[in-house]
Amino acid sequence: MTNDAIPVTNRGAAGTTIRNAAIIRGMTTPPTLHRDRLRWSDPLTLAVWVAILVVNTVLNGLVARSDHSGLSAWEPWTWEITSALIIALLIPLVLWFNRRLPLTLETWRRALPLHLLASVAFCVLHVVGMVVLRMLVYRRMHGQYDFGDWRLGFAYEYMKDIRSYFFILVVAWASRFLLLRSGGEARVLAPPDAGVPQVDEAQPARPERFLVRKLDREFLIATRDIERIEANGNYVNLVVGDRVYPMRGTMAGIEAQLDPAEFVRVHRSHIVGANRIASIEPLETGDARVHLKDGGQLPCSRSYRANLRQRLGQEA
């Protein structure tokens, strides 16, 4: 598939203008963010978190060993390693919760109280998990682990865990920022000298192209080249082949701007190009499974199934 790309350049604060009026055919779109790069299952993301946990565990272990020189050498290390193991298991949950309720400058008034409650749950799971692991290790070493007063212990651990919780959010935010900066973030292309607005549900224009900002350059991608759109927190991902261009906005906002003759909503988290659909498989639950021409699959919820059947003239 050939993508259309037009380099554009800034013209002061007023907005952007196109450097070349003609579409440069055959020019590939810039490398951009892969859809899995922000997920825990991505190897690079996993390596970053493992490195953070290992360094933190080693430093804390050395401090604990120095502060408790009268204990057996394995005990302070047991404390730190069991704590790190439980935090490693909790990081995917924190990232999942942050995707469902992103903590941003726009949402902090609503999201911050819920994240504070989540940090309490994070502490409870952390303390209970590491205490259980420590009891098992001590039993193996023919000893007995005593956590002490649980109320004081929880208060002490929470002062550390709330910092750990928000540190995880900061790392996730920094990762997203760097990846968007290096990979390219899409915006709706406005008319010349009108600026580059975000998705606005109150102005359902139908853009023919989207502006992608990558480092100090800007590119255009044609709307017809977009294969599907998927929700991702307070972003929507424009999927073009194996590339993903995140754009700040909502599924309802971007759906209102797309041509209904070319794109169809199949799920609250998925919009797909109608010409990308190969077949529809009804399911016993009343939902359906959409099979794409590239071999991929998308869920189709029952609330969108009737419209999909009408649009494609198939028995869905």
Image (tube, rainbow, N blue to C red):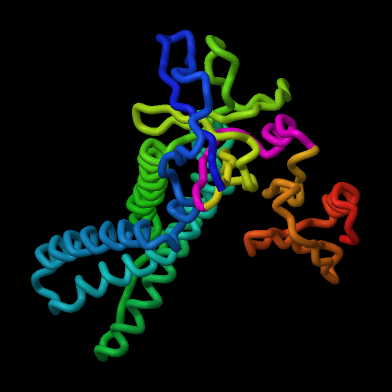
Q: Position of residue 90 (x, y in %)?
A: 44, 62
The residue lying at 51 percent from left, 51 percent from top is 118
Pick the front one: 89 or 204: 204
The residue lying at 41 percent from left, 64 percent from top is 126
Q: How many marks?
A: 0
Residue 175 horizontal side relative to residue 308, left or right: left
Residue 163 horizontal side relative to residue 284, left or right: left
Residue 287 horizontal side relative to residue 194, left or right: right
Q: Is residue 268 above or below residue 204?
A: below
Pick the front one: 231 or 257: 257
Which quadrant holds the C terminus? Answer: bottom right
Q: Is residue 77 magenta?
A: no
The residue lying at 37 percent from left, 53 percent from top is 161
The quadrant where residue 66 appears: bottom left
Q: Is residue 250 magenta?
A: yes
The quadrant where residue 218 appears: top left
Q: Position of residue 96 (x, y in %)?
A: 53, 54
Residue 78 horizontal side relative to residue 118, left or right: left
The residue lying at 10 percent from left, 73 percent from top is 70
Q: Position of residue 290 (x, y in %)?
A: 74, 60
Q: Is residue 303 visible?
A: no
Q: Is residue 200 visible?
A: yes
Pick the front one: 15 or 60: 15
Q: Position of residue 306 (x, y in %)?
A: 89, 52
Q: Which residues are magenta?
A: 242-260
Pick the front one: 197 or 250: 197
